[in-house]
Amino acid sequence: MKSASLPSLRVEPELRKAAEKVLENGETLSSFIESSLRIGIERRLQQKECIARGLASRDQARESGSYFDAENVTGELRTMLTQAKKQKA
């Protein structure tokens, strides 16, 4: 498969210097930019999936009339977190 190139990116000199300062040993600016792009794409895909699940859940709740009180849910989550911390300790 042929590789493709991205449009060149113009940035302030300070941003380029900041990026160069955080490069790891043997890492190039190009590989850092590619990695950042891949991470950004993955994050956006996850956001879209999360929103889709939330909207589907909302629609299901509307259809069934079954809702969960936010205070009860956060209380259950706190209990789960407390238990997980105890097991880890």
Image (spheres, rainbow, N blue to C red):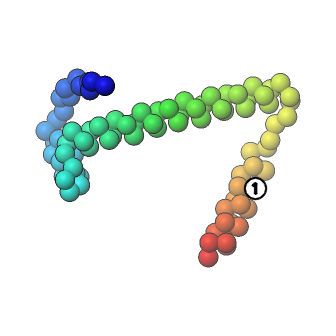
Q: Position of residue 33 (x, y in %)?
A: 26, 38
Residue beneath label 1, please? 76
Callout 1: 10 Å neighbours few (<14), some, many (20+)?
A: few
Q: Amino acid at mark 1?
A: Glu
Q: Is residue 26 above or below residue 58?
A: below
Residue at the farthest front position: 1
Residue 69 lies left or right of residue 37; in this view the side is right
Which quarter of the figure has residue 11?
Answer: top left
Which quarter of the figure has residue 78?
Answer: bottom right
Q: Secondary structure at mark 1?
A: helix
Q: Position of residue 55 (x, y in %)?
A: 67, 28
Image point 53% across, 36% down: which residue? 46
Question: Can residue 6 be seen here?
Answer: no
Question: Can residue 45 be seen here?
Answer: yes
- Where, quadrant-wise, is the N terminus in this rendering? top left
Residue at the farthest bottom position: 89
Q: Is residue 65 above or below residue 79?
A: above
- Of 18 and 20, nearer the camera is 20
Which quarter of the figure has residue 5?
Answer: top left
Image point 46% across, 37% down: which residue? 43
Residue at the farthest right position: 65
Image point 75% across, 49% down: which residue? 73
Residue 59 lies left or right of residue 47; in this view the side is right
- Where, quadrant-wise, is the C terminus in this rendering? bottom right
Residue 6 lies left or right of residue 49; in this view the side is left
Residue 62 lies left or right of residue 40; in this view the side is right
Residue at the farthest left position: 13
Q: Position of residue 25 (x, y in %)?
A: 20, 57
Q: Position of residue 52 (x, y in %)?
A: 62, 28
- Of 73 and 56, nearer the camera is 56
Q: Is residue 77 above or below residue 35?
A: below
- Of 31 and 22, nearer the camera is 31
